[in-house]
Amino acid sequence: MHILILPSWYPTKNNKLSGIFFKEQAEALAKQNIDVGCIAINESSPRYIFSKREISFDYYMKDLNNVNTTSILYPVPNRFKFLRKLIRKMIFKILFKRYIKKYGKPDLIHLHSFVYGNLAIWIKEKYNINYVATEHSTGFARGIYNKEEISYAKTIFSQSKYNICVSNELKKLLENKFDMEFQYIPNLIDTDFFIQIKTRKEKFSFINIGFLDKKKNQSMLIKAFSKAFSNDKNILLTIVGDGIEYKNLKNLIEALNMQKQIKLYGVANRKEVLGLLQNSDAFVLSSEYETFGIVIIEAMSCGLPILSTKCGGPESILINEKLGKLVDKDIKSLSDGMLELYHTSYNNDFIRNYVIDNFSSSVVSKRLIEVYNGLKNQET
C-alpha cells in the first residue's frame, strides 16, 4: 500500500519543529512496511522575511527516513488569502505530478487538517484517489473560523472517506458542528527518544513547554506559581519557548519578584527539550485551547506527572489520577493544582508505560493502517 501524507505545516530549515508530529507519524508508518510519501507546502510570511532579513526558498525531493518527501518553502503575502490559495494549488499540482512520475500514484491520501483540503479534493477528482482527514486545529474550539471557512471545512470532511480527530473533545465538537461521524486516533511520539532517567534533585522543578502567546496562557501560570510557591525557594518553574509574549512574561516575573524561581529558557531544540524534561519533576500546561497536547505525552514518556487546564486535548490523555490532574482555567485552580501535585507521590514507571501502550509510534501507526486497509477492502 502506498500512502501520501498531505500536512498543512511541516518542518523547514527555518522552523525544524513545525509539524514535527506529522513527520514522525509518516516515519512510523514507513516502519510498518508500507510505502509512505509526503508533499509538504510551507509558506513564509513577509513579516518573517522582514524580521530575519532573508527571503526563503527551499525545495527538495528525497528519501528522509524511508519517507519519499517532497517539500517546498516559499514567501507569500498573508493578507491575500485568495492569492495564497491560488499559488498554493498551482505549486501543488506541479509537485504532485513530479511525485507520481518519480514514486508512482498513491493508493490513498492522508490529509492533516482541513486547511489544504482543496488539494486532496483536486487529487480525488483528477486521479480518482480517495483521502482520509485528521483534524488538529484549535480554531473550531476558539471560534475563529467564519461562515465561509466552516462551509469549506464541511465540504472537506464530507468528501473524506474517514474522518479522524486527535482528541475526544474535538471529536464531540466536530460531530455536533457538522452532523457527521469522526473517530478518535491520537497523535504519536517516539517513546524510544523520550526516555525516563531517574536522577536525584535538590529542588523540585515544574516545566512548561510551548509558544509564548495568549493561547498558551503562561501569564496565568506565572501568577499561579507565584501564589503557590513564592515562599519556598526550593521549588522552580522553567518555561521553554519563544513568542510575542516573551517581554510581557519577563516583566511579570520581575514584578512578582520571582526571578530566582521562574526561568524563561527560550527556544530549545529537540535534544535540549529531552534533557530539560529528564531534569524536571512535573509538567504543567496552562493553555486556553489544545486539540491534543503533544508536549504532555512527551513529558509523560519521560515519567513526569501532568497538571493541565481543561482545554480540550488533555482530557483524552489524563484519564485517571495516577497520571496527573486536570483543573479549571483560573489562577486559583492552577495554583491549588500545583500544590496538590507537589505533595502527591506518583509512579513514574506507570506513567511512562501508559504512554507506550497508548501513544507510541507502533501502536498508533498500526491503528492508522487498520483504517487504510479497511478502506482498501471496501473498494475490492
Image (cartoon, rainbow, N blue to C red):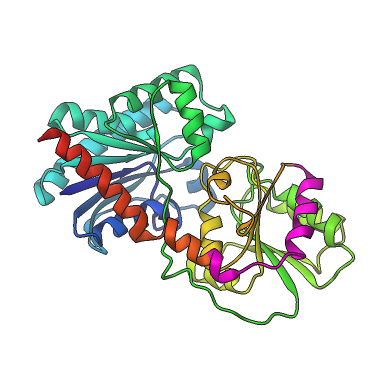
Q: Residue at 30% x, 34% y: name it.
A: 162
Q: Looking at this view, is 91 or 108 the one in front?
A: 108
Picture layout, residue 39 above or below residue 124 = below
Question: Does the magenta-highlighted stretch encompass residue 200?
Answer: no
Give x and y (percent) for residue 106.
16, 44
The picture quadrant where one finds residue 126 is top left
Give x and y (percent) for residue 241.
60, 58
Give x and y (percent) for residue 270.
48, 66
Q: Which residues are magenta?
A: 330-351
Q: Residue at 61% x, 55% y: name it.
A: 242
Picture layout, residue 245 above or below residue 202 = above
Query: In what quadrant of the picture does the C terminus appear?
Result: top left
Question: Does the magenta-highlighted stretch encompass residue 350?
Answer: yes
Picture layout, residue 365 above or below residue 97 = below
Q: Residue at 65% x, 70% y: name it.
A: 280
Q: Is residue 326 left or right of residue 105?
A: right
The picture quadrant where one finds residue 76 is top left
Q: Is residue 251 visible?
A: no
Q: Looking at this view, is 234 or 300 the one in front?
A: 300
Q: Is residue 335 left or right of residue 127?
A: right
Main SS class of the magenta portion in the image: helix
Q: Looking at this view, is 6 or 328 the one in front?
A: 328
